[in-house]
Amino acid sequence: MDLPYTLSADRPPQIGMVVLQADETIERDMRRLLPAEAELLVSRVPSGRDVNAASLAAMEDVLTEAARLFPSGARFSAIGYGCTSGTAQIGAGRIRALIQAGAETPCVTEPVSALIAACRALGVRRIGLVSPYVAEVSDRLRQVLAEAGIDVSGFASFNQSREETVARISAQSIRDAAQNVADHAECEAVFLSCTNLRTLDVIDAVERATGTPVLTSNQVLGWHLTALAGLPRPKHAPGRLWAREAVTAST
């Protein structure tokens, strides 16, 4: 017997995320950062265990296919690409085009565009940067930020190339690094780079200790996705950033 049914007219706002195969952190963080009424749908893109310029650039060839793996019935308010260094390597505009070639959405963002919007919202032009990665990866990000008018006035790195190591750097190590950069650099904010770095639980503590705004890859990405999708701010999101309206003209 065929059962009768009706279709619900209600559709929750949907946010998409294209996440690196090697990333163990961003999905949990996004579910903390996005408001409860948002539905998060995730696709994965192949990525190497080692992070270097070549492995980051290689994702350009598979981003559209990853976006095509989202459910065909989804209606996305916005889609995020979850890689800071990959964005710096491939380029924000190219990533937007590749994702929109595979999935229909009016808005695409990633941590670099989100960071630039966050800095504009906070009036920040000089940041201290904490990176987990090797020099060629960190240097490319610094170059892209400089082109956007954001000066990296202080820098420190854990100098790691393995993603599974990055995901397991302790909160205390991240907190110590952030405080050290804030204490020794003439910066207006500290940025903790990498979506696989577990940063959310150190933001408020470092802001209290240093008096300096703390921005992280996942935090700014969640903030920017929320603004682009026209969603209300989530409760208890970490950091001063959430008190600011997003500047989205550059996305």
Image (cartoon, rainbow, N blue to C red):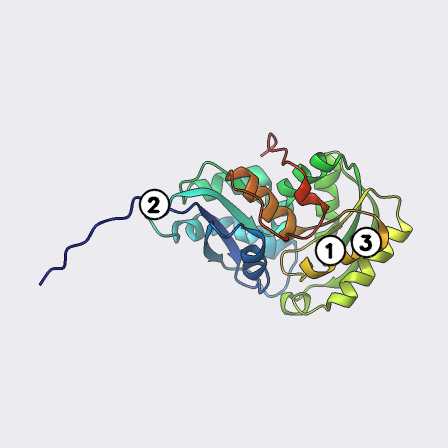
Q: Quadrant of residue 152?
A: top right
Q: Residue at x 11, y 60 (%)?
A: 2
Task: Give left or right: position of 157 versus 62.
Answer: right
Q: Which residue is mark 3?
A: 208
Q: Is residue 145 visible?
A: yes
Instruction: Give the left or right position of residue 110, taking residue 191 as reference.
Output: left
Is residue 115 something one can see in this rendering?
A: no
76 displayed left or right of 214: left
Would you call the spot at circle 3 few (<14 residues within 10 Å), some (14-19), or many (20 or more)?
few
Quarter of the image for residue 224 reads top right
Q: Secondary structure at mark 1?
A: helix
* Eye-nearest disc, 3 or 1: 3
SS at mark 3 in the image: helix
Residue with the mark numbered 1: 203
Q: Amino acid at mark 3?
A: Arg
Pointer 2 residue: 10
Amino acid under disc 1:
Ile
Residue 250 quadrant: top right
Q: Mark 3 to mark 1: distance in Å? A: 9 Å
Q: Position of residue 170 (x, y in %)?
A: 73, 69
* Crowd tier of the residue under label 1, counting other residues whose Cα lies within 10 Å: few below 14, some 14–19, many 20 or above: many
**Looking at the rendering, in which quadrant would you find the C terminus?**
top right
